Amino acid sequence: MAESSDKGKSGPVPKPGTVGGANGRGEAAPEAAFDLWLQRGLHQMFDDVMREPIPEELLRLIEQDQRRG
């Protein structure tokens, strides 16, 4: 059986279409740039919503369901 040249190497597997997560010029691959843009945009839109307290009525319903389960 032939040994693989990757034996002993570990680390993340790059996405298809990328070379080590970069385009060979030290810049982020288009997929990584889009992922970063999307993540930042979602955080801008939803971080404030995530900081809002959970409504008392919803907490009450969750507690009732847990007692029944």
Image: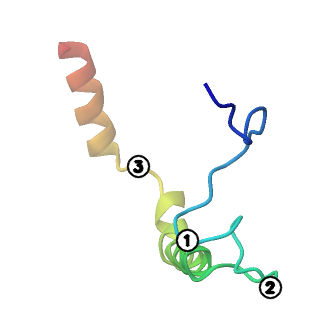
x, y percent for residue 57? 26, 44
Is 56 placed left or right of 25 in the picture? Answer: left
Residue type, label 3 = Ile
Q: Amino acid at mark 2?
A: Arg
User: According to the image, label 1 marks what residue?
Assistant: 39
The dot on residue 54 is: 3
Q: Which residue is mark 2?
A: 25
Q: Amino acid at mark 1?
A: Gln
Question: Compared to 2, does 44 lie above or below?
Answer: below
Residue placed furthest toward the left: 68
Query: CA gap, disc 2 to disc 3?
Result: 46 Å
Label 2 vs 3, first from the N-terminus: 2
> Which mark is first along the chain, 3 or 1?
1
- Tell me the SS state at disc 1: helix
Q: Residue furthest front?
A: 1
Closer mark to the observer between disc 2 and disc 3 = 2
In the image shown, does 19 or 4 lie closer to the viewer? 4
In terms of secondary structure, where does tag 3 sit? Answer: loop
Identify the residue at horizontal 82%, vertical 81% (top origin): 26
Proximity of marks 1 and 3: CB atoms separated by less than 8 Å = no
